[in-house]
Image (cartoon, rainbow, N blue to C red):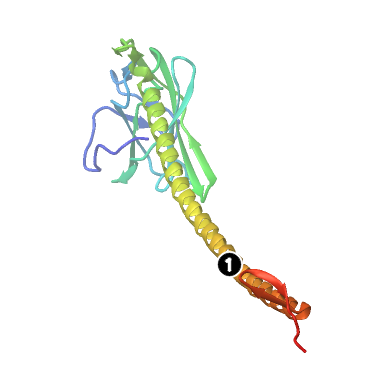
Amino acid sequence: MGITVYSESESFSNVCVIDSVTRQIAIPEGCDLLGVQYDKNACLVHFQMDPWPTELFDMTNAQVRIIYKNAAGEFGSYLVTNKFITNGVCSFAWEVDANALKEKGNVEFWVCAEMLDGSTVKREWHTLKAIGNVAEGLLHVTGSVATESKDEVMQLLAYAKQVSDDAVKQINSTKTSTLSEIKENSDNALSSIASKHTNAIDDIENTKAATVVTINNLIDTLGLNVKGGKVCQRIRVK
């Protein structure tokens, strides 16, 4: 994605003019160099055109893309984010990315404008092909990692950090949940033990009382007398 680095009041001598009738992109003499091989987002290619290229197409709210084919034969697309219309001229710029400058040689490019109705393309307008040049460059190497691979390495590092952060959050969340469950289970277990213990004591006391009553009833029934811890038969005296 490009960034706006110029204002509506600025003008440039190296502007590619688009003819709305012939659809040709006129590149100023000596301005066909898009960059040196391995450049990245370092150069702007400026465009100007009629805001109404046809009686049915209005550039005012149109979405503009630069479609290109690099010297390696790979297609790419750049979404313009700095389009403006002033004094009856529609101006915008292409921030040439690394993929367009991947290989030395010719880069073919087109301007595509789309009038949208929500997410639906209502009208679409294209220019003819233009050709820019990429000069041979030398790939800078830092250690064993080439600049070309830096982005991928940084993306992997960022992804690894994100995964690590998510894992720590998940562990902390699980740890809190587990501690809560352990405490709840412990409280339930203690309550259960205390309840059972209380019930057991009550049962013992009740059984003891019932046993004493039963023994006393048995003594009375058999006519026994308990003396000094020994059971003796009662002797009735007539």
Residue density around tag 1, few if under 14, some if 14–19, many if 20 or more, within 10 Å: few
- Residue found farthest to the left: 10
> Residue 147 location, x and y as percent?
33, 18
> Residue 180 location, x and y as percent?
47, 54
Helix or strand or loop: what does disc 1 sit on? Answer: helix
Name the residue carrying label 1.
201
Q: Residue at x 36, y 16 (%)?
A: 133
Q: Is residue 192 above or below residue 97?
A: below
Q: Is residue 184 above or below residue 216?
A: above
> Residue 143 location, x and y as percent?
29, 12
Q: Is residue 59 above or below residue 32?
A: below
Quadrant holding the C terminus? bottom right
Quadrant holding the N terminus? top left
- Residue found farthest to the front: 238
> Residue 113 location, x and y as percent?
46, 39
Front one among 101 and 92: 101
Q: Residue at x 42, y 32 (%)?
A: 159
Q: Is residue 236 something that shows in the picture?
A: yes
